[in-house]
Amino acid sequence: MQLLKAVHHIAIICSDYDKSKRFYTDILGFEIEREVFREERNSYKLDLSLNGQYIIELFSFPDPPKRPSRPESTGLRHIAFQVDDIELAIAQLRKKNIVTEAVRVDEFTGKKFTFFADPDDLPIELYEI
């Protein structure tokens, strides 16, 4: 019997809740499933879905430490989303003033991919399927 079935969700802690909420909903197109303010923690928890699938928990906490990202550090490196047409996805992001890196090609699969960052500099990858 296989222990794991699928990824359930990705938890992200942000430094500016309103800015990150707008980024993930207005720019990337996630839908809000539930939003709660946890008074005892002075923290918001925002459950986000994509195409009907629950994917991200967005948290706010007072004064969270910065995320080590560059140079490469131990731990979660990035999150990746699949797209049908990378050039179209990049064009849609550019219309919303999101800058992406140059498109690269995966040396093992021959598939195109690129990166951009969320408001807290979390690397996000787009991978053409």
Image (cartoon, grey):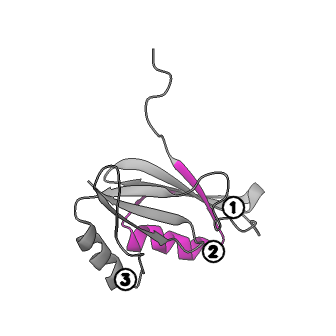
Q: Badge 3 is on which residue?
A: 96
Q: Is residue 10 left or right of residue 68?
A: left
Q: Is residue 57 above or below residue 23?
A: above
Query: What's the distance in space between the residues labelled 3 and 2, CA to CA?
Result: 19 Å
Residue 27: x, y in percent? 39, 74
Q: Residues within 10 Å of mark 1 (few under 14, many from 20)?
A: some
Dot 2 lies on which element? loop
Q: If you read the primary sequence from the N terminus, does the residue marked by circle 1 or circle 2 appear first?
A: 2
Q: Is residue 86 left or right of residue 39?
A: left
Q: Residues within 10 Å of mark 3 (few under 14, many from 20)?
A: few
| Residue 127, visible in the rendered structure | yes
Q: If you read the primary sequence from the N terminus, does the residue marked by circle 1 or circle 3 appear first?
A: 1
Magenta stretch in the rendered image: 10-34
Q: Is residue 50 above or below residue 90?
A: above
> Measuring 40% from the left and 54% from the top, which residue is drawn there?
49
Mark closer to the observer (3, 2): 3
Q: Badge 1 is on which residue?
A: 43
Give yes or no for contact between labels 3 and 2 (Cβ–Cβ under 8 Å): no
Q: Amino acid at mark 1?
A: Ser
Q: How many marks can you see?
A: 3
